[in-house]
Amino acid sequence: MTDAIPPRYDRVSAVGFLGYAAGVALIVWCLNGAGFSLEKVTTSPPRFADFMSRAWPPNLEPSVLERLGWKMIETLQIAVAGAVIGVILSVPVALLAARGLVAGGWINQVTRTILGFLRAVPDIAWALVFVVAVGLGPFAGMLAIVVDTVGFCGRFFADDMEGTDKGPAESLAATGARKIDVVACATIPAAMPAFISTSLYALEKAVRSSTILGLVGAGGIGIELKVGFDLFDYPTAMTVILMIAVVVIGIEQISGWARNRIIGTER
């Protein structure tokens, strides 16, 4: 008996080989459609270095920082207001999307299809729609964040409620409690930690999204970034980029800390 070393990988069947070949062909086709070019990759560093040389140091004039600061505050207002309203609206929508709670199967499917549509359309596209509907300004951006948040939280809230322990809910149902009472007293409290965690993720997402909605006239600091590049005012554009990075990273850190505290408390 020989101590042969087992093969690291199983031998690929003919069908498997064809599948791998089709996957490679698909990737090559996508790269070609995306305009991938090694020449552009190798010649881009000098251009990037030229941009950095013209953008650095960032514009730190007090008047510029004050103007950008107010725009950043407006961006945070759009994000927080839109995320809070979106989270609140997501709860009743999630109740309709969750299977076996308060609605029948066809209502679940229709609601999930609508939520899928809301998620499929990018937030900047929703911003364009609301700019047409309500005009330029932060209100259009807030509405875009609301719709995007409902699509995001509605689906995850529904999954969170479906994944809760069914014991308490079944016990309440056995006593003759109505479906809505079972959901309010057993299902939602059990899913609340997941709701809060998902809501914090939604807030992070809203802050990141709100920073670029200004590019289409939906308020916030994005318009300052567009103007900076349009006027070749790269130092101001760099200031905007750095402000966005600091604010987004700061919100993510605060959200992560809050999420860890909530999870730790529940444990």
Image (cartoon, rainbow, N blue to C red):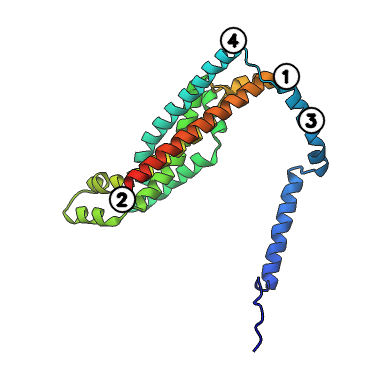
Front-lying residue, 258 or 208 = 258
The 10 Å Cα crowd at callout 3, few under 14, some 14 to 19, many 20 or more, is few
Per the rendering, the mark at residue 247 is none
The 10 Å Cα crowd at callout 2, few under 14, some 14 to 19, many 20 or more, is many
The 10 Å Cα crowd at callout 1, few under 14, some 14 to 19, many 20 or more, is few
Q: Earlier in the sequence, mark 4 or mark 1?
A: 4
Q: Position of residue 57 (x, y in %)?
A: 69, 20
Q: Report the residue marked by disc 2.
A: 101
Q: Earlier in the sequence, mark 2 or mark 1?
A: 2
How many angstroms separate mark 4 from mark 1 (CA)? 19 Å
Q: Position of residue 107 (x, y in %)?
A: 37, 48
Front-lying residue, 262 or 142 = 262
Question: Looking at this rendering, what residue extends furthest in the top direction?
Answer: 63
Q: Residue at x 59, y 10 (%)?
A: 63
Front-lying residue, 45 or 13 = 45
Q: Position of residue 264 (x, y in %)?
A: 36, 45
Question: Looking at this rendering, what residue extends furthest in the bottom direction?
Answer: 1
- Horizontally, is 239 left or right of 89 in the view? right
The residue type indicated by label 2 comes to Leu
Q: Report the residue marked by disc 1.
A: 232
The residue type indicated by label 4 comes to Ser
Q: Report the residue marked by disc 4.
A: 63
**Based on the displayed image, in which of its 4 quarters is residue 33 positioned?**
top right
Q: Report the residue marked by disc 3.
A: 47
Question: Looking at this rendering, what residue extends furthest in the left direction?
Answer: 175
